[in-house]
Amino acid sequence: MNIPVIDSEVAVTGEESALVIDRINTLTRRFNRTDSSVVSIRKKNDWFKAELVIVADGMTVRCEKLGSTMMEAVILAADFLESQLAKYQSPVIPDRNRADLVVREKHFPIRRLELNKVVLEMELSDHDFFLFQDIDSGEIKLLYRRADGKYGLLVPHANDI
């Protein structure tokens, strides 16, 4: 049995920890093999944010939800993941060709730019993301526009799984 890791900036009682582990273990039963599961709990102003990440059967499922209490946030996130997983057969098996959902393919050159110029281009364009090669490190990175209007940066790395 996989024991979920609880990463929290707030105090978690033994009872709360047991409830969180029980909810995560219920979700992981849908998979043949669970490599890891992490529950991150953060306090954000007057809200609690729970992020659930499960790595199983070669894929990663993830969700984050806000709640007025820590347990509400965890329950909302677990309920959401449960509803997402329920859309598929149990256990989760890639039983159909999901590549059919890709309706367009676009080819473009990856430009070598510094992050500051990429942010400027994003501000001047109507795009929600920008894939580029960092001029300093040579790494491929993806800058994206967040819901709050700020930017996030995705930097891929080799996976050991």
Image (tube, helix red, strand yellow):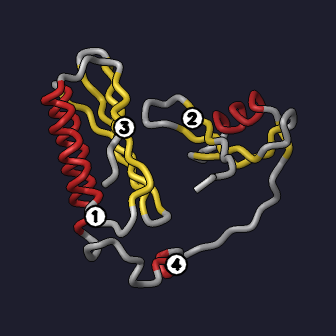
Which numbered disc, 1 or 3, marks the residue that appears first in the sequence? 3
The residue at which mark 1 appears reads as 85
SS of the residue under disc 4: helix
Q: Residues within 10 Å of mark 4 (few under 14, many from 20)?
A: few
Residue 125 or residue 24, whichever sits in front: 24
- How far is disc 4 from disc 2 in space, using C-alphas? 27 Å
Q: What is the three-letter code of the residue carrying label 3? A: Val
Q: Which mark is residue 111?
A: none
Vertical position of residue 149 compared to residue 85: above or below: above
156 to 107, vertically: above or below: above
Query: Label 4 is placed on what type of residue?
Result: Ala
- Picture layout, residue 35 above or below residue 129: below
Q: Nearer the viewer, mark 3 or mark 4?
A: 3
Horizontal arrangement in the rendering, residue 47 relative to residue 125 (left or right): left
Q: Amino acid at mark 2?
A: Gly
The residue shown at (25%, 73%) is: 90
Q: Earlier in the sequence, mark 2 or mark 3?
A: 3
The numbered mark at residue 152 is 2
Q: Residue furthest bottom?
A: 96
How far apart are the alpha carbons under marks 1 and 3?
21 Å
Q: Earlier in the sequence, mark 1 or mark 4?
A: 1
Query: Which residue carries the number 3 mark?
Result: 5
C-alpha separation, residue under disc 1 versus residue under disc 2: 27 Å
In three-dimensional space, the C-alpha distance between marks 3 and 4, rounded to whole angstroms, equals 32 Å
Q: Which residue is mark 4?
A: 99
> The residue tagged with tag 2: helix, strand or loop?
strand
Which numbered disc, 3 or 4, marks the residue that appears first in the sequence? 3
Ranked by sequence position, the earlier of labels 4 and 2 is 4
